[in-house]
Amino acid sequence: MSNNLQDKIETQEYIVNMGPQHPSTHGVLRLMVNLEGEIVKNVDPVVGYIHSGIEKMTESLAYPQIIHLTDRMDYLSAHMNNEAVALCIENALQVEVSDRVKVIRTLMAELQRLASHQLWWCVMGMDMGALTTFFYGLRDREMILDIFEETCGARLTLNYSTPGGVMFDLHPNFQKRVKEFTKYFRKVLPEYNQLLTGNVIFKERTVGLGPLSKEDAIAYGVTGPTGRASGFACDVRKHNPYSAYDRVQFNEILRTDGDTFGRYQARIDEMYESLNIIDQLIDNIPEGDYQAKMKGVIKLPEGEFYQRVETARGELGVYILSDGKKNPYRVKFRSPVFSNLWVLNHLIKGQKIADLVAVMSTLDLVIPDIDR
Amino acid sequence: MKALIQYISTILQGLLTLVKGMAVTGHYFFRPKLITTQQYPENRQTLKMFDRFRGEVIMPHDENNHHKCTGCGICEMNCPNGSIEIITKMIETPEGKKKKVIDKHIYHLGMCTLCNLCVKACPTGAIVMGQKFEHAVWDRTQLTKVLNQPGSELMKDVKE
C-alpha cells in the first residue's frame, strides 16, 4: 500500500532563495538553492547586492586616498588590505621602508588575523546554534580592537598603512597591551577547543562534511585556510614573504582532510601561529622612522604593478595599471572571498540544506569583499 | 553485544564533551565580570576614548576665539570624498594690504570616512580629530558643520 503511494506521489525540484537578507550568509549574499526534498541539488550564488564600485572609484583618486577605500572591502582584514596597496605603491616607486615599519605592519597584520579568526569562530558557533561562542569570541576580539583604537585611531576601518610607512608611530602602551593580550589569549584559546571543537554535536555536524580535494582547491583557486585545509600550500607569507615575514619562524598550517572540520581546525591552528609570530616580534621592534619621505603628489611610473598579501581569508592581489599620472588608470583587486565562494556549489552538492550553513561558515565569507 | 557497548560509550563520550563545555560556561556564569566587555550606555559618564580615536574633524579655538586655519585648502584637496569645503574671503589689513582669509570651513560629517588624511596634511595643525562618537541627529542637515566659529580670527604666530 505504502509503496504504491510512494510511486504515485510526484516530487519536483524547487528553488529556495536563501538571502539576500538571511542572517547566516553574513551579509547580502543571495543563494538560489535548488532543492529536491532536503537534498541540495545545486547552489547558485547571486552577488552584487552590495557592490560599491571601489575599483572604479580608485580611478579618480590619488594613490594615498585609495588606501582608505580598501578598508571597506574585507573589513575584517582591513590592515592587510591597506598593506597590500601600500606595498604595491612602494614597489612601483622603489621606496625602501624602514625595518620599524615592516615590523609594525607585520604585528598589526597578525593582530588583525587573530581578530578576524576570533570573529569567524564566534559566528561559526552561532551558525551551528551555539550562541555562547558568540559572546566569548567577541570578548577576546574587544582587546585587539582596543589595541587598534589606541594606536591607529579606529577599530575597524584602520587606514593605518600609508605609502612609505604607517599613519602614526606605535603608541607607548602598545607593547604592554599586546603582551597582556597574548598572555591572556594563550590561556583562553584552550577554552575555545573545550567549548566547540570537542563538542559532540559540533563534530557530528562537521566531520566529513563538504570535503574538498587538493586538486579541486587548486582548480577553483581556493586560498587561505580553506585551501590549506585541503593540503594546498598557498601561504603567501611563507612562499613569497613581504614585510617582516622573512625574519620570523612559523609553520604553514597544512592539513589533508579538507572537510568542514578540517577547515575549522586549520583556522584554530592559525591562531596559535599568529600568536607565535607576535611573540617573536613584539620584544624587538627596531627603531627608525615610521614614515619614509614621500613626494607631496605621488605619481607612479608607467606600467603594471602587482602585489599579493595573505589576508585572513586568503590571497589578496592588488593590480595597478598606471599611465604615469597621479591617478591609477585601472585597479583590480583579486579578492580571496570571491574565489572561495564559487567552490560552495561543489562542496554542498548532494548534502542536506542544513549543512549548507555549516559549509558556508567555514568558507568565512565577507560579502563586501566579493562585490567590492 | 559489541555494537551495544559502542553505542553506549558514544553516548557517554558525547555527554562528557557536553559537560566539558558546560564547565566553561559555568565558570563564567559565576564570574560575570570576566565575560562582560563594557556596559555602554551606563558608563557614559566615565567613558573616555583613546587620544587618537577618530570621531570627527574639529578645529580648536583658543580663549580669544583664534584658530590656526589659513584657508590654504590643502585639506580640501586631500579629502577623498569631498567632505570639506573651504570658502575664503579677501580682507584689507590695517597696513592697507589685501589678504585672503578663511570665511567658512565647511565640514560634511555625513560624507566623512574619518580617514585622517586631512589632519595629516594640514600644514599648520589647524584641524584635529575629536573624540566625540555619538553623532546621531534627527535631520541630516545638522551633519553639515562650519568648523571655524563666527567672528574667529587667525592666530598671530601662524605662518602662512
Image (cartoon, coloured by chain):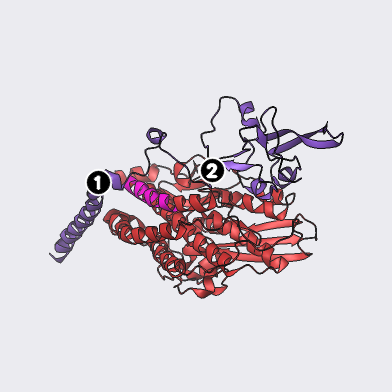
Chain colours: A red, B purple
In this picture, residue A312 sits left or right of residue A318? left
Q: Main secondary structure of the magenta part?
A: helix
Q: Check residue A143 for magenta coloring.
A: yes
Label 2 element class: loop
Question: Against A78, is B81 above or below?
Answer: above
Whether residue B101 appears in this view of the structure is yes
The chain under label 1 reads B
Residue A157 image offset from top left, x and y in percent? 55, 49
In this picture, residue A192 sits left or right of residue A158? left
Label 1 element class: loop
| Label 2 sits on residue | A28
Residue at left 52%, top 55%?
A77
Q: Amino acid at mark 1?
A: Arg
- Specify start and end residues of the magenta stretch as a single range: A131-144
Quadrant assignment, res B94: top right
Residue A338 image offset from top left, x and y in percent? 57, 55
- Which sits in the foreground, A39 or A353? A353
Quadrant assignment, res B153: top right
Residue at left 22%, top 52%?
B23
Q: How many marks?
A: 2
Residue at left 27%, top 56%?
A200
- Which sits in the foreground, A145 or B155? B155
| Label 1 sits on residue | B31
Q: Check residue A127 for magenta coloring.
A: no
Question: Against A261, is B158 above or below?
Answer: above
In this picture, residue B128 sits left or right of residue B160? left
Q: Amino acid at mark 2?
A: Val
